[in-house]
Image (cartoon, grey):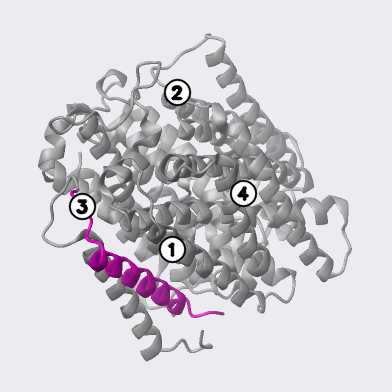
């Protein structure tokens, strides 16, 4: 790969800006609240784009391109089925409890609604999962820099970790959020030329469809049976596993994304945060999955005299994970390559900073303040937040080195989500909408759900049960985890003593006044925005049926 | 807090000009796709326009709160 000083100059300019934003925002960090929840004063369009961007790590971008090459347009379901409905649900129905309860984190909501042990369990699993996700993300990025720049993995991991450290330790959550918006625009401008050039090269959408196997260019028509599509899943597993359990488990309960909405300036802004994020989210497949399809087309039908774009791995499959960087190397000249690398770096950093800011908040409020040191001056928790930032980044670096042995990195993360997030959604659903649910019920239900997911995975590994693909196994594992948690929570709640109704005001649907949106302009009302978002998503599904 | 339109506008203007300048100074060689304009020059100008629009918007309609 031909890398010039101009490519480095673009990367360096970007790095100066993100660190600069951290330094400017440093003077706004006066107490722990401003560091951890940005003082609740950020407008909705910024929290909305940050909500999207924090989820859009290098892992997501690379993984979705890889899945695009491996599974075709079915990958779009990670967006249209696996994200949008849940994003609308969390904005319209769940945000009133998160934002209205004044909880500072998702685990803290669990403490207010249920009890201390449920919060502790969630805080610990979330902290662990966040560090792992951050490490995998970092590993994905280091691999790209090794491939395209010839950098050693150690050097790219170290340099990027230091930049993220510089802007999160100074400006806290606000710095992370503001940079995520900057990074969002860079990701769009860095990947868009790749899609446009690629489509132009293969002869537009028609040309692309002609070069791919039939199952790769339809989102729904192959889902009648597991044999009819490359993912090996039928519509029930797709809609229930991905669309309902995994998706709602992630978007509605994961503090990484919910934290962005909690920083919004008022209730309407908080509720609109995921809805604003949903609009670019539904268009993102065009930006991140199309490169995967183009890469596959150039692999199956290389130009005359050229080698296939993707390399063959020793086990006979194509090296899908590198679809995006290989395509970038194929189309981008010096200069634009620097921009493309900046976009990848931006996606990596937005994901990592998201993980780090969520981790330091949960660690400080839900573990340190809850169990280790209850009464301390505010300045002490601010100091602890900065320490947790350093430790969180150091642990992510460790996780990055651990993550180097998996075939498809995205499948790995889905597996983790199915262990911890899938049962969690049952807990929140019952907590927010069923007044009778108790703390013991929530805790033991959650435990049972996680154990069920792990047991299901062990059964697959031991050969007791099997699925056509790892992905299908993950989806079904998530369904089992959810059902077991739901049943366990209900059963135990019914035999334990409920909390008195007056303690649950503002935490449960039946005991909370509906958020007032009559004085808000109609086009800003969450219910209206949510309905528009859903209608657009249905239209997209029909277009690519 | 911080008017984010400023850093976004400035970064895109700067990077856009760098790309466009590079495209003018050193037209790239043969690429898999042939276009009428130099790729760096064209995309650099698009980015510069976006950056200028953001900066102009921030300058003409300042945030009620405080400046950059």
Q: Main secondary structure of the magenta part?
A: helix
Left or right, residue A72 beside residue A7 = left
Could you tell me how far apart the alpha carbons at marks 4 and 2 are, in whole angstroms?
Answer: 32 Å
User: Which quarter of the picture shows residue A262?
Assistant: bottom right
Q: Which residue is mark 3?
A: B29
**Residue occupying image coordinates x 42% and y 57%:** A342
Q: Secondary structure at mark 2?
A: helix
Q: Secondary structure at mark 3?
A: loop
Asked if labels 1 and 2 share a chain, the reply is yes
Q: Which residue is mark 2?
A: A470
Q: Which residue is mark 4?
A: A158
As drawn, A119 above or below A313:
below
Q: Nearer the viewer, mark 2 or mark 3?
A: 3
Q: Nearer the viewer, mark 1 or mark 4?
A: 1
As drawn, A401 above or below A523:
above
| Residue A126 can be seen in this image | no
Q: Which residue is mark 1?
A: A9
Disc on res. A345: none
Could you tell me how far apart the alpha carbons at marks 1 and 3 are, in whole angstroms?
Answer: 21 Å
| Residue A375 can be seen in this image | yes
User: Which quarter of the picture shows residue A483?
Assistant: top right
Magenta range is B1-30
Q: Nearer the viewer, mark 1 or mark 3?
A: 3
């Amino acid at each position: 790969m031909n890398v010039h000083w101009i490519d480095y100059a673009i990367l360096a300019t970007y790095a100066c800006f993100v660190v600069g934003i951290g330094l400017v925002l440093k003077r706004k960090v006066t107490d722990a609240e401003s560091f951890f929840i940005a003082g609740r004063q950020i407008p909705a369009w910024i929290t909305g784009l940050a909500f999207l961007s924090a989820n859009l790590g290098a892992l997501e971008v690379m993984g979705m391109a890889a899945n695009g090459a491996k599974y075709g347009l079915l990958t779009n379901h990670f967006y249209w089925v696996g994200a949008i409905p849940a994003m609308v649900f969390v904005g319209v129905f769940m945000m009133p409890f998160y934002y209205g309860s004044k909880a500072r984190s998702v685990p803290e909501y669990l403490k207010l609604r249920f009890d201390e042990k449920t919060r502790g369990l969630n805080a610990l699993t979330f902290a662990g999962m966040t560090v792992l996700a951050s490490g995998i993300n970092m590993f994905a990025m280091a691999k790209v820099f090794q491939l395209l720049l010839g950098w050693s993995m150690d050097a790219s991991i170290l340099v990027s970790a230091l930049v993220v450290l510089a802007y999160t330790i100074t400006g806290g959550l606000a710095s992370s959020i503001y940079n995520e918006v900057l990074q969002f625009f860079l990701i769009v401008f860095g990947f868009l030329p790749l899609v446009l050039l690629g489509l132009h090269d293969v002869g537009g959408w028609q040309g692309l469809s002609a070069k791919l196997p039939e199952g790769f260019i339809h989102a729904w028509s192959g889902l009648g049976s597991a044999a009819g599509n490359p993912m090996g899943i039928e519509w029930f597993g797709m809609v229930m596993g991905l669309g309902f359990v995994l998706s709602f488990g992630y978007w509605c309960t994961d503090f990484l994304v919910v934290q962005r909405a909690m920083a919004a300036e008022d209730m309407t802004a908080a509720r609109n945060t995921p809805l604003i994020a949903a609009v670019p989210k539904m268009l993102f497949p065009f930006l991140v999955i199309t490169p995967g399809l183009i890469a596959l087309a150039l692999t199956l039908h290389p130009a005359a005299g050229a080698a296939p774009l993707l390399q063959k791995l020793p086990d006979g499959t194509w090296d899908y994970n590198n679809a995006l960087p290989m395509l970038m190397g194929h189309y981008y000249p010096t200069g634009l390559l620097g921009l493309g690398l900046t976009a990848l770096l931006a996606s990596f950093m937005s994901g990592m900073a998201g993980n780090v800011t969520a981790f330091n908040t949960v660690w400080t409020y839900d573990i340190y303040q809850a169990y280790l040191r209850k009464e301390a001056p505010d300045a002490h928790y601010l100091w602890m937040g900065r320490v947790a930032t350093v430790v969180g980044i150091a642990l992510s670096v460790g996780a990055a080195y651990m993550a180097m042995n998996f075939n498809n990195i995205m499948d790995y993360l889905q597996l983790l989500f199915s262990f911890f997030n899938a049962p969690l959604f049952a807990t929140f659903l019952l907590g927010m909408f069923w007044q009778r649910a108790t703390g013991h019920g929530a805790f033991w239900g959650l435990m049972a759900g996680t154990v069920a997911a792990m047991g299901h995975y062990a059964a697959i590994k031991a050969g007791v049960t099997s699925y056509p693909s790892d992905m299908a196994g993950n989806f079904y594992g998530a369904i089992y985890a959810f059902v077991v948690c739901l049943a366990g929570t209900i059963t135990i709640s019914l035999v334990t003593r409920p909390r008195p109704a007056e303690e649950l005001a503002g935490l449960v649907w039946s005991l909370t006044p509906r958020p007032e949106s009559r004085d808000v302009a109609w086009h800003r009302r969450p219910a209206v925005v949510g309905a528009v978002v859903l209608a657009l998503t249905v239209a997209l599904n029909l277009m690519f049926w | 807090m911080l008017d984010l339109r400023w850093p976004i506008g400035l970064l895109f203007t700067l990077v856009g000009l760098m790309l466009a300048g590079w495209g003018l100074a050193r037209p790239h060689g043969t690429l898999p796709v042939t276009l009428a304009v130099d790729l760096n020059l064209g995309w650099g100008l698009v980015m510069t326009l976006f950056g200028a629009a953001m900066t102009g918007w921030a300058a003409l309609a300042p945030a009620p709160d405080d400046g950059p």
